[in-house]
Image (cartoon, rainbow, N blue to C red):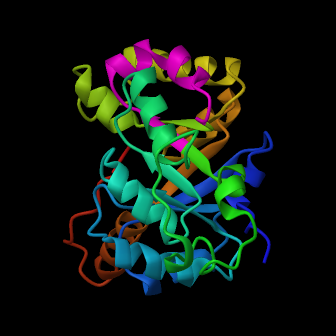
Amino acid sequence: MQLPQNPFKRSLDGNPRYGCWAGFGTGYATEILATTGFDWLLIDGEHAPNTVPSVLAQLQAVAPYASAPVVRTVNHNPALIKQLLDIGAQTLMIPMVDTAEQAARLVAATRYPPHGFRGVGGGLTRATRWDSVEDYLARAHEELCLVVQVESRSGVDNAEAIAATEGVDAIFVGPVDLSTGVGHAGNPNHPDVQAMIRHTLEATKAAGKAAGILAPAEADAKRYAEWGFDFIAVGIDISLLRQAAVETIARYKPETPKPKSSLGY
């Protein structure tokens, strides 16, 4: 059996790719999203109630569809990274990366020796198709995609070095954490925050890497696409459900408060 191709990595061709956060933590809900036309789906292990088994169920659920899965970890734990890779995640998003040293350590966690320290699971793992993928140990990195998140002042200051780190494929800007961390909570469109986002984008592009961002507000998403972001999360499943539910009941109960629009989560 040949090494499975990574559809997300191969889709980063300079055209904007639009995705949706998958936060329900179930294969059923994520499979529904996979039928709707999003280019990619973020299976969120940081803020959603996901575990390794629930991430596996979602990877299996979306496998027949064109929407490419991206799995976000809860932290930098190399043991968890190993587990997620072993169950078949090929694109990982890692939050809160502030330095090139952190980025290099994360790269090493995704590589087998001598290029890293990922443990060998062999026939126990879905990633190897239970030891039926030829030369998996030597070639696994070819189809991996490592996305690191810049969402702090330190991350922005070190964006050039982070982006230049060999093995980092993309940088994803977290506007909500970034704006909160620099004193503009709830306002990622503050001019100072926008300047930091643009700086990170330019640093990423200068290194020849792809850049992504979360932008559930349509005007923001269109602006970021014009700037040159390669992949943009334009929806969050939980928010979409709540908004649709409130709008539906408001047709029959006009006193229902309208849902607030959000620039982030």
On screen, residue 167 versus residue 72, left or right, reads right
On screen, residue 21 versus residue 171, left or right, reads left
- Magenta-drawn stretch contains 229: no
Instruction: Please tell me which residue lies in front, 15 or 245.
Output: 15
Q: Residue at x 67, y 40 (%)?
A: 230
Q: Position of residue 245 (x, y in %)?
A: 34, 78
Q: Position of residue 246 (x, y in %)?
A: 30, 73
Instruction: Say which quarter of the image contains residue 130.
Output: bottom right
Instruction: Please tell me which residue lies in front, 43 or 178.
Output: 43
Region rendered in magenta: 147-168
Q: How many marks?
A: 0
- Where the N terminus falls, by quadrant? bottom right
Residue 216 visible in the snapshot: no
Q: Above or below — where is 265 with respect to 128?
A: above
Instruction: Please tell me which residue lies in front, 113 or 58.
Output: 113
Q: Residue at x 58, y 35 (%)?
A: 168
Q: Above or below — where is 208 with respect to 44?
A: above
- Magenta-drawn stretch contains 163: yes
Q: Residue at x 70, y 60 (%)?
A: 6
Q: Position of residue 205 (x, y in %)?
A: 68, 23
Residue 218 visible in the snapshot: yes
Q: Above or below — where is 64 with respect to 186?
A: below
Q: Residue at x 40, y 37 (%)?
A: 174
On screen, residue 121 versus residue 204, left or right, reads left
